[in-house]
Image (cartoon, grey):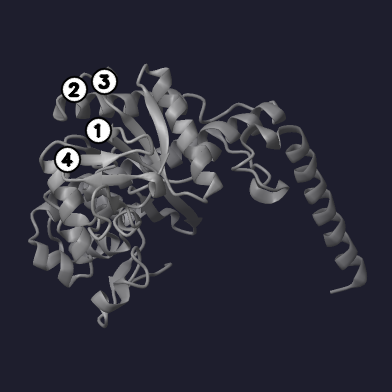
Amino acid sequence: MTPKTDNLKLDVLTEYIQRRDNFYQRLGGAWSRTLNQPTDILEPISVTVDDIAEINAAARGVMAVYSELAILVRQLPRSALERIGIPETLSSLVDTPSLIDDLLFARLDFIVNGDGIKMVDCNLDAPGLIVETFEINKLVCSEMRAANPNQMARQLLSKTLSGAVSSVSRFVGRPVGECNTAVIYGEGFDRDADAADFVRKVLMESNINAKTASVQDLEFDDDGIYDERAQRVHICVRLYPLAELLNAKIFHRGNHTKSFDAPVLKRLVQSRRVFLISTPFAAILESKIMQALTWKLYVEGVGFSEPVRKFIRQYMLPTFFRRRALKASMSQNRRSAGVEAVLP
C-alpha cells in the first residue's frame, strides 16, 4: 500500500467523520439519550423500491416460519425444551396465557450474501432500535430530502400496540382508560429510556394513558406489580428482556427476602393481576435455539408446511445444535448457547 493510497483513505475517513459531526450538531439533540456521539448513527445508504420489496418479502417469509414454529413449540413438553437448552425459568412459562399474538412485533436482522437475504436474528422478546427505526430515520431522510421508507411505520406500530393493550385490558377486567400501563426499561441504559419514552408517546397518541417505569423501581406482592408511586401496574409493555427481568431483584413490598421469579410472574398473569407485552412465550421464540430447531425440523422434513419450508430454505441460515454442554452453556449466553449458524 502506497503513501498516496493511505492519504486518500484518510481523506475519505476525515470527510465521513465531518459529515457525521455536522449531522450530529444539527439534529443530535432531538434524541439525546439515543445519539450520544456523532457516530452513533452511521451514514445512510439509499435503497431502491426493489430492495424494499425484497426486504418486505423476506420479513413476511420469516414471520410465516415463526408462526408455524410457535404452534409446534407449544406442543413440546417442558422437558423437551429444557433438553435442547431452554432454561427452566423460561420453559416454565411456556403455557402462560397469551391473549395477544406472540409475534406482535419484532426486529429482524438480515444480511445479504451470494444467496440473497438471510436472517441472522429474530428479536421478539424486547426488540431494540425502536427510536432509530421510527424517528431518527425520519430525521435522516428529511435531512437528505429523501423519501422515508418507514413513513407509515409509526402509524402501524401505534395501531398494533394500542390494539394489544385494548385486548389485554379486557383480560385484566378493566376499561383500557382505567388500566395503569407502564413501559418498562432498565435503569442506567439511556437508549432504553429514550425508547420507553417513545413507546409511551405512541400509546398516548392512541388515547392510552401510559407512563414509563424503570425495572429497578418496581415492587411486587401477592396481588401484583407496583410502580414507584405504589400504584399497581396492570399492563407492562416490556423493553427489557424477560430473563433479565426475572433476575432484576424486584423486591416484595412487605418482605424483601422474597424474590420475584418465574413462578411469581406466572401466578400473577394467570390470576389476571398483570399482563406482559411482549408475551413470555416470545422470549422463548427469540432464542437462537429456536433457529437450530427450525433447521433440524426442516432437514428432517417434519412439522412445517411446504410453503414455509420454501421460506426456511430461502431466508434462514443453516443452524445446528452443538452436541455438548447445551444446558451448561445457556447460563453464559441466554440467546445463543449451544448453537452454530453457518454462512453458505
Query: What separation in Å lies between label 2 and label 4 (alpha carbons)?
Result: 15 Å
Q: Which sits in the foreground, 151 or 248? A: 248
Q: Name the amino acid type tagged 1.
A: His
Q: Earlier in the sequence, mark 4 or mark 3?
A: 3
Circle 1 crowding by C-alpha within 10 Å: few under 14, some 14–19, many from 20: many
Q: Earlier in the sequence, mark 1 or mark 3?
A: 3
Q: Nearer the viewer, mark 2 or mark 4?
A: 4
Outermost residue to the bottom: 324
How far is disc 2 from disc 3 in space, using C-alphas? 6 Å
Q: CA distance from mark 4 to mark 1?
A: 11 Å
User: Local crowd at mark 3 within 10 Å, few (<14), some, or many (≥20)?
Assistant: few
The circle drawn on residue 80 is none
Amino acid type of disc 4?
Asp
Residue 338 visible (yes or no):
no
Q: Which residue is mark 1?
A: 234
SS category of the residue bearing label 1:
loop
Q: Which residue is mark 2?
A: 174
SS class, disc 3: helix
Q: Which residue is mark 4?
A: 223
Mark 1 vs 3: CB contact within 8 A: no
The residue where tag 3 is placed is 178
Camera-near label (4 vs 3) is: 4
Circle 2 packing at 10 Å, graded few (<14), some (14-19), many (20+), is some
